[in-house]
Image (spheres, rainbow, N blue to C red):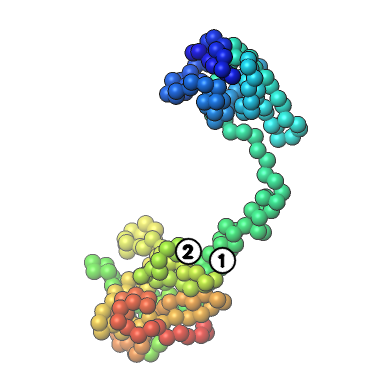
Amino acid sequence: MAFIARGKTYGTLLLGEDMMKGIAFLELKDSTSMFTFLRAAMCACTKQHGSKVLTLVGTTDTTFKFSHQPIFGPVENIEVEFGNLKEWKKSKASLAEKCEPTAAFVHFVDQSGIATLELQRAHVQKTLLQLCLDNPVLTDDILFTKNPCAVYTQKAIKKKALKLYPAGTVSMVKDEKPEKYYIQAYDKLWLIVPFKPLTDFKGGGGGVLYPFWSVKSADDGLLTLSEVSVVGCKTPFMVNAGPLSNVTLLSLSAPHQDGGKEPPAKRQKAK
């Protein structure tokens, strides 16, 4: 292609195949547009300079000026005559780069917001599971069914003697306040997601069986939603407001945390 620089024509500029493909889509009528194209593309000439990636920094009447900045050491300047550009091609590689100490400092583990958030999540997760372990539900107390999925008492239970916690995993809520169950901690909301449930009572096959997630809502529910605060984590749980007789279907009077027309959950201290 004809190349014009500084108002003069310098014959045909020979470029490598990759560069020619890129130039075919451009209207390069002067040295300024050619300069812009090559500078944006960055270039390489593996035959002479190996894996180095070079950036166009200037032109003369007959040459292009490139530079290469290694991670260590001074800048390397290279000048190439127009006719020798046929051995060059556009590079897809990125320039070598070092992370300055001031930039690296704020991303170290002890300074990283990501690490801090993960520590918070781990604390909330441990607190939730510890509550479930410290308040076990005995198989002598309840019975699970499926088709329909439900939970029944297997004996009489005294008032507020049955406490069901939402065993599962937690994740920080990033958007709006969730309608489902969550924990409040570190001025954040942490959504509780149940573990994979057990669906095959005879064959097993993995899964967790926990009554909290099998309790359905009902207008005349015998369980109420309450909240306990343990080591900075406000966690919801279900409790029986009155005594329960044998073979009683467990149901919740409120549809979900802070939801429906039920009054706010009462807060209790951990025992």
Count neighbours of disc 1 (C-alpha within 10 A) and say few if under 14, some if 14 to 19, many if 20 or more: some
Residue 122 percent across, percent down from the top left = 55, 64
Could you give the CA–CA distance between mark 2 and mark 1, rounded to whole angstroms?
9 Å
Q: Is residue 24 in view from this perspective?
A: yes
Q: Residue at x 61, y 26 (%)?
A: 56
Residue 239 percent across, percent down from the top left = 39, 83
Q: Residue at x 53, y 78 (%)?
A: 230
Q: In which quarter of the image is residue 40?
A: top right
Dot 1 falls on a residue whose secondary structure is: helix
Kindly check if marks 2 and 1 are in contact, taking CB atoms under 8 A apart as contact. Answer: yes
Q: In which quarter of the image is residue 61?
A: top right
Residue located farthest toward the top when viewing the structure as drawn: 11
User: Which label belongs to residue 120?
Assistant: 1
Depicted 179 relative to depicted 107: above or below: below
Q: Nearer the viewer, residue 102 or 214?
A: 102
Q: Is residue 120 left or right of residue 191?
A: right
The disc, 2 or 1, on the residue closer to the chain's N-terminal end is: 1
The residue where tag 2 is placed is 172
